[in-house]
Amino acid sequence: MLYYIFDFLDKTYNIPGAGVFQYISFRAAMAAITSLFIALLIGKRIITWLQKHQIGEIVRNLGLSGEEQKKDTPTMGGIIIIISTVVPVLLFAKLDNIYIIVMLVATIWLGMIGFIDDYIKVFLKNKKGLKPSFKVIGQIGLGLFVGLIMYFNSDIVIREKLSKAEITTVSKTKCMKEASDFFREKEVRSMKTTIPFLKNNEFNYEVLTSWMGKYQEQLEWIIFSLIVIFIIVAVSNGANLTDGLDGLAAGTSSVMGITLGLLAWVSGNFVMANYLNIMYIPNSGELTIFISAFVGALVGFLWYNSYPAQVFMGDTGSLTIGGVIATYAILIRKELLIPILCGIFLIESLSVIIQVSVFKYSKRRFGYDYASQHRVFLMTPLHHHFQKKGLHEVKIVNRFIIISIILAILTIVTLKLR
């Protein structure tokens, strides 16, 4: 909104300083500051309102230290994250940018699913909340939306790098001084994405349907959409499982958000894309503004969510966080880096899958008593396992954030490790 106002003032009246809104770096910085300010400003008010209406966390008796003190802590604090993200994006981003539109839809979409789940738990006093099948249907719906937009929208394009042979040919006819000279002039719709550790760090999803012959073109969008759906469902639920200790989900997600912002910036910058030998994604730089607002909102929420938490994000926040990270990674074509970047979400999810699978197998093979006594973990998700071992939750959260930082660095390094 402000972008268009200042753009009009700059072009019409040539007001000094109005042109600064043309710079993504300035708008990204303003979005981060604004989102942080909004989160701090409305956070206390929302917490007070939630307390007044006795919207507290429903705590199961799991025998964990500090469990009782969490009982009356307000939940549904994810509202703070959503408001603090959406408002700055509406103020500072180009609202006709397809990437921004998709991210706003993803944020509100999963925010609504999480809100309904929390509403059922808190207001209707149903501990089970929204049926898992309905949650998954909602996540699948978002995945299908993102997949179809990515495949069919004409504004989602890339500019590929010239091959060495093409560079040699072009350099004979003109001097290649600018970074943009090393990319093809024509923007193309493509199924390519970034894949780590390989010399040619691009993977084309068309390979998955190349064996289908005449049906390839008709079935490509189905295969691609299924992959997108799987990623969004997996990451969203991974974030949901990680939200179990004060500051854990918000802290680790902030690290992931900063990393994704850096990846979006290099993908939308000719110089950096040329240096890292990656595809250039036109107009994706605008996503830097969204992720800046998102990280600012997470940090602002962390002000109230750090130990001892004054508010929990609930599914309103955790489902939204996972969906935002997954959708963002898909839009900048870095979704195959998610197992590294979102390693915390991955191990949390795997710990639950392993625990349940082994328990069911042991129970069927040796009986309930044996299965109960031979669990792989003391408790899942994994952070509860360390709680059972006697570690304080602050130490667990700090160590998980450190691991998340290490994984973030490794994710960035993979762009040059081939």
Image (spheres, grey):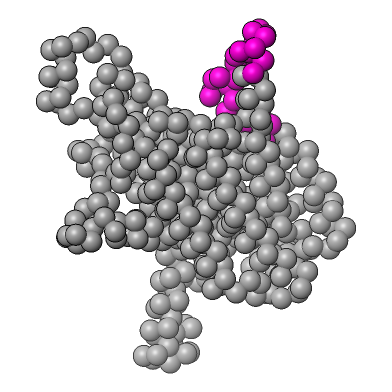
| Residue at x 47% of width, y 49% of height | 327
Residue 408 sits above or below residue 269 on the image: below
> Is 335 left, or right, of 201 in this rendering?
right
For the C terminus, the image quarter is top left
Task: Quadrant for residue 362, please give it.
Answer: bottom left
Residue 191 vs residue 74, the one in the foreground = 191
Name the residue located 22 percent from the left edge and 42 percent from the top edge: 198
Q: Quick check: is 149 in the magenta stretch? A: no
Q: Quadrant of residue 193?
A: top left
- From the viewer's perspective, tell me whether residue 119 is left or right of residue 226: right
Quadrant occupied by the N terminus: top right
Position of residue 267 measured from the top left corner of the image (x, y, whole percent): 38, 32
Residue segment shown in magenta:
8-35
Q: Nearer the viewer, residue 151 or 285?
A: 151
| For residue 190, above or below residue 18 | below
Percent x, y of residue 262: 45, 32
Q: Quadrant of residue 169?
A: top left
Asked if one can make out residue 133 in the rendered structure from this viewpoint, the answer is yes
User: In x, y percent, where is residue 340?
Assistant: 38, 48
**Farthest right residue?**
52
Q: Nearer the viewer, residue 183 or 216?
A: 216
The answer to whether residue 248 is visible is no
Magenta segment, principal secondary structure?
A: helix
Residue 215 at x, y percent in the picture: 23, 61
- Relative height, residue 137 to residue 90 (above, below): below
